[in-house]
Amino acid sequence: MSEKVIFDADIAPLKDKVVSVIGYGNQGQAQARILRENGVDVIVGNVRDEYWDRALKDGFKVYEIDEAVRRSQVALLLVPDEVAPHVYRKKIEPEIGKKEHFVLDFASGYNIMYGFIRPRPNTDVVLVAPRMIGRGILSLHRQGRGYPVLIGVAQDSSGKAWDYAKAIAKGIGAIGLPGGIAVKSSFEEETLLDLLTEHSWAPLLIAAMQAYFDVVTEEYGASPEAAILELYASGELAEVARAMAEMGLFEQMKLHSRTSQYGQFTRARKFYRMVKEVVREEAAQIWSGEFAREWSLDQAFGRVVLQRLWKIVTSSRLAEAEDRLYRQLGRR
């Protein structure tokens, strides 16, 4: 077995600590609840909004972010990437500066890789990055199952940073249960893998569905309802994805007809030649920091591009047809 792969760990490094979960969104709620179930002393740091109220309802002691950091020795920074640098500089760093030692955990490599957050020397900087959405984490936990995480260390102030990373992975229910696995990684690798997903096959899937819809409805007269059901609304796509996770990308192809196998394999070769260069270009832009600069610039101007793109896609024929169908199906 590779030394990079970890299936279980000791949670003891967290047992005598107060752990603050900063941000009670989807990941924050899931991780805080499971940490508490595993016997860890957990508090929540959040602004006074609906998530503050949700944490109180779930039975947590909730504090302003700086106060939560003041009361803890370990913090899981689980606010969105674009918010985290401001939260760190204004609320977290001043409190860490008053401590002899602190453990700061990230669920994303983004801000450390690009230097938007530069932790103090007295800080163990660790990465525990779930490859699962918060709702999925809670669902798996109820089934007594774990899930995959990437773990890494960017700064080892105490000499025990890896122990803390593994303990957090254990504490949030990722490892030590069936299906659970931690893979030793780095902030840079996690960022590259995560962003490249969002820049390659995910947008390709969106573009392919939009092109499919436009061609079959505009050029061949297919009904929008039938097209959307075929594409994703039936749930078949989700079942295929589940089979990929359980069986593997190619093994699950045996569940498809031979006509489907032939069509997918032969056309995949054609698309591969077209797509690989795009993936290479996107990976280079992520690695160099070019994309981070682009996204930061759009944020600085009020997310003009993002808001404009949302307007474009939500006014498309596909979005309008989807809305009609989903209302008829009772999903909206």
Image (spheres, helix red, strand yellow):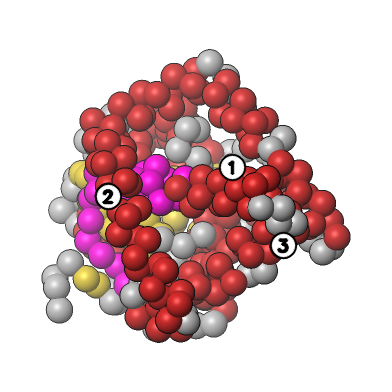
Q: Earlier in the sequence, mark 2 or mark 1?
A: 1
Q: Amino acid at mark 1?
A: Asn
- Residue drawn at x 35%, y 30% is 291
SS of the residue under disc 1: loop
Residue where numbered disc 3 is placed: 226
Q: Which mark is residue 273?
A: 2
Q: Earlier in the sequence, mark 3 or mark 2?
A: 3
Q: Quadrant of residue 46?
A: top right
Is residue 101 visible in the rendered image? The answer is: no
Q: Residue furthest front?
A: 220
SS of the residue under disc 2: helix
Q: Residue 198 colored magenta?
A: yes
Q: Earlier in the sequence, mark 3 or mark 1?
A: 1
Q: Which mark is residue 46?
A: 1
Viewer-side label of 3, 1: 3
Q: Is residue 313 above or below residue 241?
A: above
Viewer-side label of 2, 1: 2
Q: Is residue 121 left or right of residue 24?
A: left
Most foreground residue, 257 or 200: 257
Q: Residue 330 colored magenta?
A: no
Is residue 84 visible in the rendered image? The answer is: yes
Q: Residues within 10 Å of mark 2 (few under 14, many from 20)?
A: few
Q: In the image, residue 234 lies at what x, y percent?
A: 67, 69
Residue bounds of the magenta highlight = 181-203
Callout 3–callout 2 Cβ contact below 8 Å: no
Q: Amino acid at mark 3?
A: Ala
Q: In the image, residue 263 lies at what x, y percent?
A: 42, 68
Most foreground residue, 235 or 147: 235
Q: Is residue 186 above or below residue 97?
A: below
